[in-house]
Image: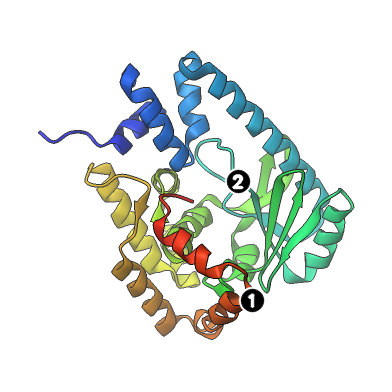
Amino acid sequence: MSRESKTLKLLRVIEGSYKPHAEEVLELAKLAKLNKLYLAYLRVLGNTLRNELLREEARYRWFMRNAVEVLEALKGLNYALYKFRKPVEHVSVDLDILIDRRDIPKAVHALKSRGFKIVVSEPYTVTLVRRGFIVDLYTEPSFAWIVYMSGKRLLREHSEDVEVNGVLARGLSREAEVVVAAAHAVYKEHIVLLMDCLVMWSWISKRIWGIAMNQGVEKALEELLKTCSLVKSGCIETPYKLRPHVVLKAYLDKILHDPFFRVTLPNTLKYMFMRQGSGRMIVARITRKSY
């Protein structure tokens, strides 16, 4: 009988069906951090890592207070929370917003009036920061100035009213978040987290295939399903770094079938030329364990 993977142990801890042994607590805590499940893990443990739990809960409250203020600033604009809705509460490194390009000036003005400053302005993204809180305004889901999904269609066809800490806001539908998680993991990060699998397992439905086909990212969804199946069988650990040939195959499919991806592909050369330290960034992406 094969040993249970550490990832499956972490999953069972979060689900409440496994209590980690004393020697496993810190090891699984480290794994939970890498998989963006640290808060969920600490909440299950309760007093076992009490000080860490208190710190993480404080970080979560701080993040949500800032997020609510940003959402109030964007009231009336055509936007949707992006990569935000998850099956478990978590502390993100930034707040991602998908927004209509026409509303970018209003959004930037509203956020600057609340103390935010622009730190990065790129073709499809504007990044603002205030006291360590980061907001990324995306007009299109992209990486290195290459567009891999249609932000306009996501906003028009797959956004809905959501409640965030008692405040009415706009967010992507759960089904759209599954597709976004797949595309983000495959095209941008090349890494699958246990959080990505939880999103997929929790919200998978027949509708996601229509969304994926409409966005031209069905290959990414297939890869996420395949990878998460291996995770559930205990064959691989997460974070799982996708093999280069898998990523290359996904890119080639996008080049062949997605005109917008194909047209924006040369932008990566401009990106590397204009971004300082792009060489170091590439090395860091190759060697990293998570993101």
Please give the name of the residue rendered at 51% of the width and 36% of the height, measured from the top-left corner: 88
Taking 271 as reference, is 83 above or below it? above
Q: Residue furthest left?
A: 1
Left of 28 or right of it: where is 78? right
Secondary structure of the residue carrying numbered label 1: helix
Camera-nearest label, 2 or 1: 1
Which numbered marker is on residue 93? 2
Q: Where on the picture, by quarter, is residue 226?
A: bottom left
Q: Earlier in the sequence, mark 2 or mark 1?
A: 2
Most extreme residue toward the right is: 113
Residue type (three-letter) at the residue carrying disc 1: Met
Q: On the image, numbered disc 1 is attached to which residue?
A: 274
Residue 84 as seen in the image, left or right of residue 257 = right
Q: Is residue 17 visible?
A: no
- Residue found at x 36% / y 30%: 27
Decide: is 287 above or below 266: above
User: 50 above or below 286?
Assistant: above
Left or right, residue 63 beside residue 29:
right
| The N terminus - image quarter | top left
**Looking at the picture, which amino acid does disc 2 mark?**
Val
Q: Nearer the viewer, residue 65 or 221?
A: 65
Location of residue 52 by image quarter: top right
Residue at 35 percent across and 73 percent down: it is: 248
